């Protein structure tokens, strides 16, 4: 059975939707960022600070490689996973890629309220950075098989739509 892989920008609800979707479908859930943190023994912001972004991307690619070999899982990927073509190719091989989206102002609100600090959004102008990254990454996210907007919806509403569409 194929994996369902949730991709998309930070703050679009991949982890929350993935967890709930896995419960709904009775499938195991894997959160790639959580795995990376567990294996590194420190949170992502510390990996970025101590090892730099390229080292984080290496860890991420390795986590993708292993997750792509799973069967029938729901997988939540970090927001940068789709920017690497090899990641996309691996995940697509045995997975259906569902891209969650949200309007930039919703992303700003959610990521500012989150207890998880996003190293890519810690500069002086997070709103501008979000716009910039969304533009840079638009073509990468467009490689997903399905796109679902989460802006004005609850986690359950998004799970309903994903489950209905995949059925
Ligand atoms: C990143 C997104 C984060 C995390 C890291 C880099 C990105 O995951 O992997 O901070 O490049 O967009 P979330 O999308 O779960 O916030």
Image (cartoon, rainbow, N blue to C red):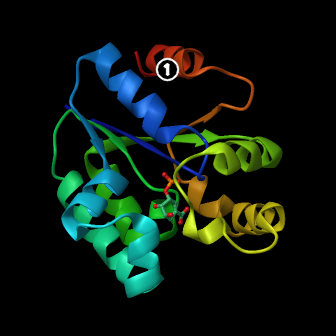
The residue lying at 33 percent from left, 42 percent from top is 75
Location of residue 122 with respect to 100 vertically, above or below: below
Give the labeled residue for mark 1.
159
110 sits left or right of 26 in the view: right
Between 109 and 6, the residue placed more toward the observer is: 109
Residue 78 sits above or below residue 2 on the image: below
User: In which quadrant will I find the N terminus?
Assistant: top left
Q: Which quadrant would residue 121 be assigned to in this image? A: bottom right
Residue 40 spot, x, y in % from top left: 24, 70
Q: How many marks?
A: 1
Q: Is residue 141 left or right of residue 81?
A: right
Q: Residues within 10 Å of mark 1 (few under 14, many from 20)?
A: many
Residue 124 place in picture, x, y as percent: 79, 74
The C terminus: image quadrant = top left
- Residue 55 figure quarter: bottom left
Residue 27 sits in quarter: top left
Q: Is residue 91 left or right of residue 128?
A: left
The image position of residue 41, as x and y in percent, is: 23, 67
- Mark 1 within 8 Å of ligand 1, using the beta carbon: no
In this view of the protein, which residue sits in the foreground, 46 or 56? 46
Closest to the observer, 105 or 42: 42
Residue 158 position within the rendered picture, expressed as x and y whole percent measured from the top left: 57, 22
Residue 26, compared with residue 114, is above or below; it is: above
Q: Is residue 107 above or below residue 21?
A: below
Q: Residue at x 62, y 20 (%)?
A: 154
* Residue at left offset 47%, top offset 69%: 45
Q: Secondary structure at mark 1?
A: helix
What residue is rendered at 32% in x and 78% in y? 58
């Amino acid at each position: 059975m194929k994996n369902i892989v949730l991709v998309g920008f930070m703050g679009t609800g991949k982890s929350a939707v993935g967890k709930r979707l896995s419960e709904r479908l009775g499938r195991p859930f894997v959160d790639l960022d959580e795995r990376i943190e567990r294996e590194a023994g420190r949170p992502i912001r510390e990996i970025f600070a101590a090892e730099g972004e390229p080292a984080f991307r290496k860890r991420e690619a390795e986590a993708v490689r292993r997750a792509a070999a799973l069967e029938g899982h729901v997988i939540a990927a970090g927001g940068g996973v789709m920017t690497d073509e090899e990641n996309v190719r691996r995940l697509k091989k045995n997975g259906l890629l569902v891209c969650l989206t949200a309007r930039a102002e919703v992303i700003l609100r959610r990521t500012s309220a989150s207890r998880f600090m996003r190293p890519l959004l810690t500069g002086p102008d997070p709103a501008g950075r979000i716009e910039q990254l969304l533009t840079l990454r638009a073509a990468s996210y467009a490689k997903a098989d399905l796109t679902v907007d989460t802006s004005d919806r609850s986690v359950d509403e998004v799970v309903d739509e994903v489950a209905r569409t995949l059925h």
